[in-house]
Amino acid sequence: MKSGVKKPTWVVDKERGERREARETVWLFGLHAVRDALVNPKREKLRLVLTKNAFDKLEEAVAASGLEPEVVEPRHFDVPIDEGSVHQGAAVEVKPLNWGKFADVCAAGEGLPLVVLLDRVTDPHNVGAILRSAEVFGARAVIAPKHHSAPETGALAKTASGALERQPYLKVTNLSEAMEELKAMGYVLIGLDGEAPLTLSEAVVAADKRPIGLVLGAEGPGLREKTRETCDHLARIPFAGAFGSLNVSNAAAVSLYAATRS
């Protein structure tokens, strides 16, 4: 671009976003989450703070990480995490994981041809539980929009119980566009809707052994209209009782089980 020519606003915003992401760091806490981060070669680790008790429990993982820990007294355990967080005397500052390109992971990544898409699911505990279920059932990725979704945080990592280090959690700019891209790859997209005429098992059968994308919305509002329109099928989880319901993380686990049975 010639000197003196003003860049378009969208280019400036994109460059600012990229610089902001490059500076971003996350504090993970809790023995399990910290151990898994320390032994993950894909995770860029910056700072490790431990009490003596936590260091004794994590000594092998600390040695494997090559990171020099700051061993402190419990009363001096001062790291920027939410007050009241159960840190168990262990916290590590890291860079968010880079799982690679969306298309590469979804088309030919590890795991089954099965992905979970989250439409404005913002609770980190729900997303952590969904990542854990996705890993258990061998899903290829969990996908969410960059905005209006749960960021990679210590609370999410603790709930995920290590799955955050192993289960791709992909952020996309536009969820509907990502859904269209998945459909072009051959995925059948099944949106969860309690009022849908099809049951989940019927929708899975209708997918006819093609790759499946399970689409779940936030509790309460559910799927946005554009998201619903982009799904191939809407399906419900049948309940025995008249007022049965599941939260989004439980619904994800049931849906993953149903999808893998095919």
Image (cartoon, grey):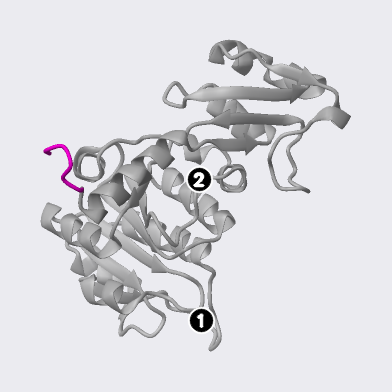
Q: Which mark is residue 240?
A: 1
Judged by depth in the image, the label closer to the viewer, 1 or 2, is 2
**Which amino acid is tagged 1?**
Ala
Q: Is residue 88 left or right of residue 149?
A: right
Q: Main secondary structure of the magenta part?
A: loop
* Residue in the image at 54% along x and 84% along y: 241
**Which amino acid is tagged 2?**
Glu
Q: Nearer the viewer, residue 29 or 252?
A: 29
**Classed neighbour count for the residue bearing mark 1: other residues with Cα under 10 Å, few (<14), some (14–19), many (≥20):** few
- Is 262 magenta? The answer is no
Q: Which mark is residue 152?
A: 2
Q: Position of residue 233 (x, y in %)?
A: 24, 74
Helix, strand or loop for disc 2: loop
Q: Nearer the viewer, residue 76 or 217?
A: 76
Task: Please report the bounds of the magenta region as a residue range.
Answer: 1-6
* Residue in the image at 29% along x and 72% along y: 227
Q: Nearer the viewer, residue 55 or 44?
A: 44
Q: Position of residue 261 (x, y in %)?
A: 33, 56
Where 201 sits versus 31, above or below?
A: below
Q: Position of residue 160 (x, y in %)?
A: 55, 45
Pick the quarter of the image with the C terminus.
bottom left
Q: Residue furthest right?
A: 75
Where 119 sits versus 136, above or below?
A: below
* Residue in the image at 59% along x and 55% along y: 125
Mark 1 vs mark 2, CA separation in Å: 36 Å
Q: Which mark is residue 21?
A: none
Q: Position of residue 187 (x, y in %)?
A: 19, 57
Q: Is residue 53 left or right of residue 238?
A: right
* Residue in the image at 23% along x and 61% along y: 179
